[in-house]
Image (cartoon, rainbow, N blue to C red):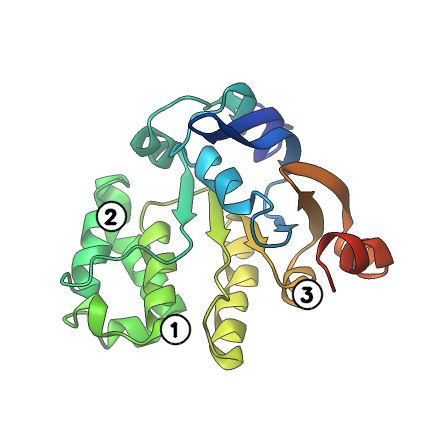
Amino acid sequence: MSGSAPALALEGIVAGIGPLTILDGVSLALSAREVVVVLGANGAGKTTLLRTIAGLLSPREGGIRLFGVPIEGRPAHLITRAGIGHVPSGRELFPRLTVGDHLDLAGRLSPPARRNELRERTLAMFPALGERLRQRAGTLSGGEQQMLAIARALMTDPRVLLLDEPSTGLAPKIVLSVFQTFPVLREQGVSVLLAEQSLTLGLSAADRAYIIDQGRIVLSGTARELANDHRVADTYLGR
């Protein structure tokens, strides 16, 4: 592992589902302790991008490196063990399992010596979950379910956290509480790659941004640069 390598680097990723190509030569990079947002309209390829990084889809072409180590093509559970945490769109919780069950199951993918520390740290970030450890996930509110989905990913001890549109369907107050975890994650050494459809939310939370359109990266820059670029809203996000 190279000390100067990006936390995550994609080069020329081509991927899709069956015969359908969704990602067409995607390249991007994420530095250590950085928050980067991938912005794009619905169907632009954001979810496919994160699923490919997480190992749920295999790229047809291109490379993915985690701190300089190739991970493309590995099974999803090995990519998780390598340090990629994935919070999918729709949360994908087990409705009959309790909050505590979710944390315990995810913790099995982290080193045994780290599990108690990870649990304490995660519940400190989401204290509402600590009050609901015996409650079934299916009975939680939407905001609590999103917190649990993030907490589950954090229990795997990730170095890079992938978040797929965490604001979807949540009240603004809950969205703010979720986005306020990013500085805490940065302090803990976790880099964040966020997929978002909301231009305002995405740019407010990130250091840098990429714009994806029809499976291709069409613009990139600092959050401030893209916030002032009319092409982002007018052309690629339809606003």
- Give the amino acid at mark 2: Gly
- Give the amino acid at mark 3: Ser
Q: Do the residues labelled 1 and 3 touch (CB within 8 Å)?
A: no
Numbered disc 2: secondary structure = helix
**Along the viewing direction, whichever of 32 and 117 lies nearer the viewer:** 32
User: Does 54 sit above or below residue 143?
Assistant: above
Mark 2 or mark 3, whichever is nearer to me: 3
Image position, residue 24 (x, y; %): 62, 29
Q: Which comes before the other along the chain, label 2 or label 3?
A: 2
Residue lying furthest front in this view?
Answer: 19
Q: Name the residue under label 1.
A: 143
Q: Which comes before the other along the chain, label 1 or label 2?
A: 2
Q: Which comes before the other along the chain, label 1 or label 3?
A: 1
Image position, residue 5 (x, y; %): 62, 28
Q: Which residue is drawn at the image coordinates 48% and 61% (left, top)?
A: 166
How far is the residue under mark 2 from the one under mark 3?
A: 31 Å
Asked which quadrant contains residue 182, the reply is bottom right
Numbered disc 1: secondary structure = helix
Q: Mark 3 points at which residue?
A: 204
Q: Name the residue under label 2.
A: 107
Image position, residue 68 (x, y; %): 56, 24
